Amino acid sequence: MTKSTWVLLCTIAAVTTLEASKKRTVCSIKGEIHPAKAIRQVWLIRNGDTIPASLTGTRLNVEVKPGVYGVWIDAIAPYQDHLTADIDLFDNNSMELGNIELLQ
């Protein structure tokens, strides 16, 4: 093998090792939404981007990267949509939204 091949292989090994050892922080948003029949979709909003969130029954439990989020619950009529804004997550913390009652 030539010297340039060895340099390339060592560089790839170093980058792979550094990426594997990088500290990855994961935060979570939790809550429960009632009534279940009123939920159409739950969205996470961050920097203008919307991401669909999955529910387990009426329970919301989403793992996200640190940042400032909003949770928008798209409700089925006659229930009203619900927005929880400015959820600030950092350093592996968790935000419990509690019980969210959708109003008619």
Image (cartoon, rainbow, N blue to C red):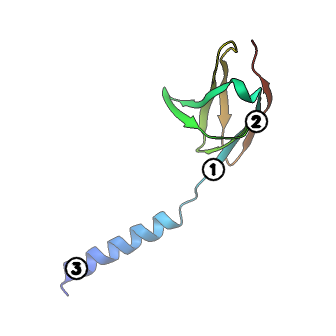
Please provide percent x and percent y for residue 62: 65, 43
| Res 19 seen here | yes
- Residue 81 disc label: none
Residue 13, located in which quarter of the rendered image?
bottom left
Give the residue drawn at x 64%, y 19%: 76
Which is more toward the observer, 7 or 50?
50
Mark 3 to mark 1 CA distance (whole Å): 37 Å
Name the quadrant containing residue 56: top right
Name the residue at 33% across, 71% down: 11
The residue sitting at 26% across, 81% down in the picture is 6
What label sits on residue 31 in the rendered view? 2
State the image coordinates of residue 36 (x, y, percent, origin top left): 74, 30
Question: Local crowd at mark 2 within 10 Å, few (<14), some, or many (≥20)?
Answer: some
In percent of width and height, residue 18 lies at 47, 66
Residue at the image position 58 percent from the left and 30 percent from the top: 43
Q: Which residue is mark 3?
A: 5
Q: Secondary structure at mark 2?
A: strand
Query: Above or below — where is 65 with respect to 17?
Result: above
User: Secondary structure under badge 1?
Assistant: loop
Disc 3 + disc 2, Cβ < 8 Å: no
- In the rendered view, does 15 fall on the left or right side of 21? left
For label 3, the crowd category at 10 Å Cα-Cα, with few meaning under 14, some 14 to 19 and many 20 or more, is few
Residue lying furthest bottom in this view? 1
Q: Which part of the image, by quadrant, shows the C terminus?
A: top right
Amino acid identity at mark 1: Val
- Mark found first going from the N terminus, 1 or 2: 1
- Kindly tell me whether residue 71 is visible in this rendering: no
